Image (cartoon, grey):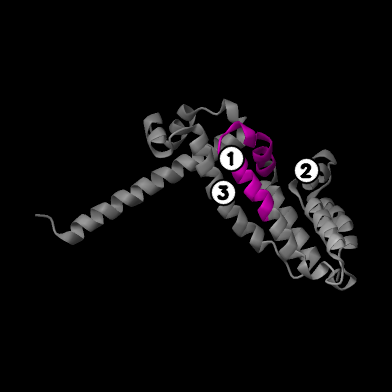
Amino acid sequence: MKSKPVRQYRMTARAEAAEQTGERILDAMLRRYAETPYDQVRLEDVAADAGVTPQTVFRRFGSKPGLLVATVEREQAALARDRAAAMGESPQDTVRSLVRFYEHHGALILKLYAEAHQAPGVPELAARGRRYHVGWCREAFADGLEPGLDEATRARRLAQVVAVCDATTWRVLRVDGGLSPEQTEEAVLELLLPLLSASARG
């Protein structure tokens, strides 16, 4: 009869192996999704990239939409941590960090928004991401949104800040406009600072 510590060790090892397999599958899906339109992503290719069988993918995630949902949920948690870290001591610091964030993640975020309707469960996650962005803007620039403003004006100011700091604005400036990251940062600040109180502009 095996001792309890041995059984526990084997159970722990199996659980860790299963978790690592799941992470490999999610990593493979993320790479495929970043490079390929969603409707052209094949689970067989994801499985091959992860070094597992398609049956393993189906058993773990149920379907291609289920796999994308799991991937997006994991990435949203990581992105939220990165966005939280982008809040700086000044608007200039915050915008610098935000542009750096979009340099790494902006294209994938915009792709998700554009293709969300193709997979059940993903539109809700995209909406959650938009709500997070609004909350982040409200918190990141709270000191700059004049406390003395009337409710309607304050709501309009926040909506403007949300638009200026959106990934779409980054794309228009950086990709469509051909600006460098430094020029994009400067352009965002030129749009943002007039919306903030004088004391917050630095």
Give the left or right position of residue 35, taking residue 64 as reference. Answer: right
The amino acid sitting under disc 3 is: Glu
Instruction: Tell me how far mark 3 sits from mark 1, CA to CA.
Output: 13 Å
Majority secondary structure of magenta residues? helix
**Residue 79 included in the magenta stretch of the image:** no
Give the residue number, with chain letter if any, for mark 3: 75
Q: Residue furthest left?
A: 1
Q: 165 or 155: which is nearer to us?
A: 155
Give the label on residue 171, or none: 2
Give the label on residue 122, or none: 1
Name the residue: 40% across, 39% down: 60
Is residue 16 positioned above or below 4 on the image?
above
Name the residue: 89% across, 57% down: 190
Q: 122 or 199: which is nearer to us?
A: 122
Answer with mark 3 or mark 2, whichever residue precedes in sequence. Answer: 3
Instruction: Tell me how far mark 2 sits from mark 1, CA to CA.
Output: 22 Å
Q: Residues within 10 Å of mark 3 (few under 14, many from 20)?
A: some
Give the left or right position of residue 130, taking residue 11 as reference. Answer: right
Image coordinates of residue 25 in percent, x first then y, are 45, 40
Image coordinates of residue 17 in percent, x first then y, are 34, 47
Q: Residue furthest bottom?
A: 199
Q: 120 or 83: which is nearer to us?
A: 120
- Span shown in magenta: 108-132
The amino acid sitting under disc 2 is: Arg
Image coordinates of residue 54 in percent, x first then y, are 40, 30
Answer with mark 3 or mark 1, whichever residue precedes in sequence. Answer: 3
Give the left or right position of residue 141, taking residue 15 as reference. Answer: right
Instruction: Tell me how far mark 3 sits from mark 2, CA to CA.
Output: 20 Å
